Image (cartoon, rainbow, N blue to C red):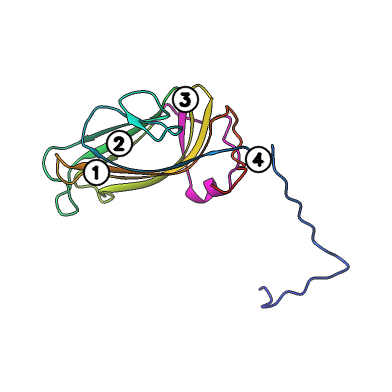
Amino acid sequence: MYPDHFTPDPNNPVVMKMWKLQGPKPLVAINGTYRIPYTDAPICFDWTTGSVGPAGGDLKATVTRAPGAITQLNHGDWSINLEAVDGGIVEVDYHVAQVTFEAPASGYEANYRVGMERGSRDWFDNIQRTFFLASRNGQVYSKFTLDFGINDDPNGAMWFRFRGAANVQGSRNWEATIPQ
């Protein structure tokens, strides 16, 4: 197999070159945790201001849930639909996102939906997914991880947590000027 200790050959070195695709750009950190009372109306998240509202921003989330308590012991139907505001969204593997420094030019979908159905073996009361998002007619490109938890009590709060980075200069470049 492989030796336990590798000794490089000084007469046959391995040279690895690394470079930035476009040079560093200032990025906006996406870093927010929100507890929002349940509503089936769209909720919009704005990466540039960190604000939440009924319209605008970058990401629109619409949640539906069955009436009554939803818990690990009392499964109920629920779903979340994600849409980019004037753009597209694509799910990506978390590890791929960590080493991707340029947003894809294509492959985005109009929306992304997760549904949890009562009785499903895969039912859970929360999700964690990673996405690439193009929004605002190509003026913002972002990569982020969403942690979402459905509210147990129908009158209680849902929770959203976002972590990632956005280029708000109309460039697909995610090479940051400083660590995000």
Which dot marks residue 80?
2
Residue type (three-letter) at the residue carrying disc 1: Ile
Determine crowd level at label 4: few under 14, some 14-19, many 20+ residues with C-alpha closer than 10 A. Answer: few
Image side of residue 13 versus residue 39, left or right:
right
Image side of residue 100 versus residue 84, left or right:
right
Q: Where is residue 120 in the image (x, y as percent from the top left)?
A: 24, 47
Q: Which of marks 4 and 1 is in front?
A: 4
The earlier-in-sequence mark between 4 and 3 is: 4
Judged from this view, the residue extending furthest toward the right is: 11
Q: CA separation, marks 3 and 1?
A: 25 Å
Depth order, front residue of 64/53: 53
Judged from this view, the residue extending furthest toward the left is: 68
Judged from this view, the residue extending furthest toward the bottom is: 4
Q: Name the residue under label 4.
A: 24
In terms of secondary structure, where does tag 3 sit? loop
**What residue range appears in magenta?**
88-111
Q: Name the residue under label 3.
A: 87
Q: Where is residue 30 in the image (x, y as percent from the top left)?
A: 45, 41
Instruction: Kindly indicate whether the residue at mark 3 contacts the one at mark 4 (C-beta within 8 angstroms).
Output: no
Determine crowd level at label 1: few under 14, some 14-19, many 20+ residues with C-alpha closer than 10 A. Answer: many
In terms of secondary structure, where does tag 2 sit? strand
Depth order, front residue of 6/85: 85
The earlier-in-sequence mark between 4 and 1 is: 4
Q: CA separation, marks 4 and 1?
A: 38 Å
Q: Where is residue 2 in the image (x, y as percent from the top left)?
A: 67, 73
The earlier-in-sequence mark between 2 and 1 is: 2
Residue type (three-letter) at the residue carrying disc 3: Gly
Q: CA separation, marks 4 and 3?
A: 24 Å
Q: Which quadrant would the N terminus be assigned to in this image?
A: bottom right
Q: Name the residue under label 1.
A: 150
Q: CA separation, marks 2 and 4?
A: 34 Å
